[in-house]
Amino acid sequence: MNMKILVVGGGGREHAIAWRLSQDSCKPTLFCAPGNAGTVGVAQTVPISAEDVPALVAWAKVNRPDLTVIGPEVPLCLGITDAFNAEGLRVFGPCQAGARMEGSKLFSKDVMTAAGVPTARSFGFTNETEAIDALDQFDLPVVIKADGLAAGKGVVIAQTRTEAVEAINSMLVEAIFGKAGAEVLIEDFLEGEEASILALVDGEHTVILPSSQDHKRIFDNDQGPNTGGMGAYSPAPVVTEDLIPYIKEQIILPVVRELKKRGIVYKGVLYAGLMIGKKGINVLEFNARFGDPETEAVLPRIAGDLIPALQACIDGNLHDGLIQVRPEAAATIVMAAGGYPGTYKKGDEIKGLEAAAKVKGATVFHAGTSLKDGKVVTAGGRVLAVTALGTDLKSAVACAYDAAKLITFTGAQYRNDIAQRAFNR
Ligand code: AMP
Ligand code: GLY
């Protein structure tokens, strides 16, 4: 019988994961909860929210997937892995204690400090007056962060002391992030170029997946507010080949060992957000999952089978031979709804998907889409992640734009400078 795999989540990352798993030689039967209008092409839809852990456990107890792959951070931080394991179900993704690497920036900093991982100097505060007093010890700009999960909005780069005080006040006093902001970190601002490293981890060993770079701001030339990510490309030339052993030996493995010392066997993806600059490499943050949209650019570059590597993470026998990388480069253009990252409309029909899918080398991953009366409509801020492979980054980017230009929906917006940093080097 075919292997059954459940993918938890409903964004572009989960479509890319399900799409990639569907190409494995064992031809698994795939399920996606809750999925989107794109995942229906490769997986059966399970209409359960990714954050409803009890309902997902109940579904899995009946349907017995051989493997479950968790996309987003919220279910991981809620302990979905522990809950599935308690029922004898295999899960790719860290346990709740491990997911604190993303769920608590203070915990993550503490682990980094103990492990000797390079990161910005920072201090944690629960008291507003103490936090404001501590600003004297920092140059401007200064970084203010909420400790907990804040859907990517918990970081403020304050250019002035007034902005820093406002940020501290909004988190500690006004509690705009609720409990997630009950403790804040004040951190040195780091300069440089950002890159994302997704590392597979089996509790002891790691395999570093191809590097990538996200585009966090909404507008070209990194202008405007932060988003969940407006595009990605892989490889990121800022991560030169000689940096990979350093990232493995000085960043990923020390964290894995430090967690093990604390009784936490970390299995899944450990995502390191890096700042590479004059002061060398520093870790900005860790995430406990595949990045979005990085995954849409990285997974198409994996050759051969992916499932054995995910299984090895669970079984503790991960090694480099399990991952083969295609020589092509990949680019992903996120098409977002008008108004995003502010308020935006849902339910607009998306046209041109079939034409875009015919562009050779391109794949359209769905992010915020749903089916309405047989039509694909917008259902989120980030709507599509249009991805292409190319013999080099230039051709990948050109191909992804060729496909994106064929797609229309009311208010559609996307950046026109994906991978420009790589070309400007
Ligand atoms: P984080 O959620 O910690 O990754 O922060 C979100 C974004 O804020 C990062 O991708 C960076 O662009 C920026 N950021 C976070 N910490 C720092 C820092 N110490 N210095 C400069 N930029 C930062
Ligand atoms: N692309 C950033 C993230 O996944 O957190």
Image (tube, rainbow, N blue to C red):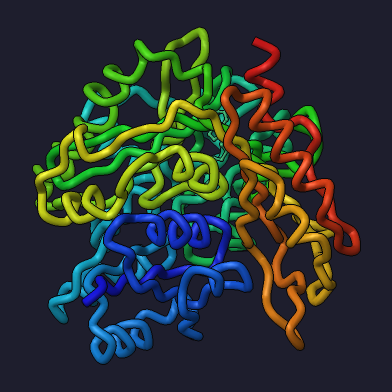
Q: Nearer the viewer, residue 145 or 320?
A: 320
Which quadrant would the C terminus be assigned to in this image?
Answer: top right
Side (left or right) of 366 relative to 202: right
- Residue extending farthest to the right is 410
Q: Residue at x 40, y 47 (%)?
A: 287
Q: Is residue 68 visible?
A: yes
Residue 17 falls in image quadrant: bottom left
Q: Nearer the viewer, residue 382 or 405?
A: 405
Q: Residue at x 32, y 47 (%)?
A: 269
Q: Is residue 165 visible?
A: no
Q: Is residue 40 above or below residue 235?
A: below
Q: Is residue 188 above or below residue 409?
A: above
Side (left or right) of 287 relative to 115: right
Q: Residue at x 70, y 52 (%)?
A: 358
Q: Can you give x and y, in whole percent of width and height, for residue 271 in the image?
A: 39, 41
Residue 324 falls in image quadrant: top left
Q: Residue at x 64, y 45 (%)?
A: 362
Q: Is residue 202 above or below residue 314?
A: above
Which quadrant would the N terminus be assigned to in this image?
Answer: bottom left
Q: Can you give x and y, in whole percent of width and height, for residue 133 in the image?
A: 54, 35
Q: Nearer the viewer, residue 20 or 52?
A: 20
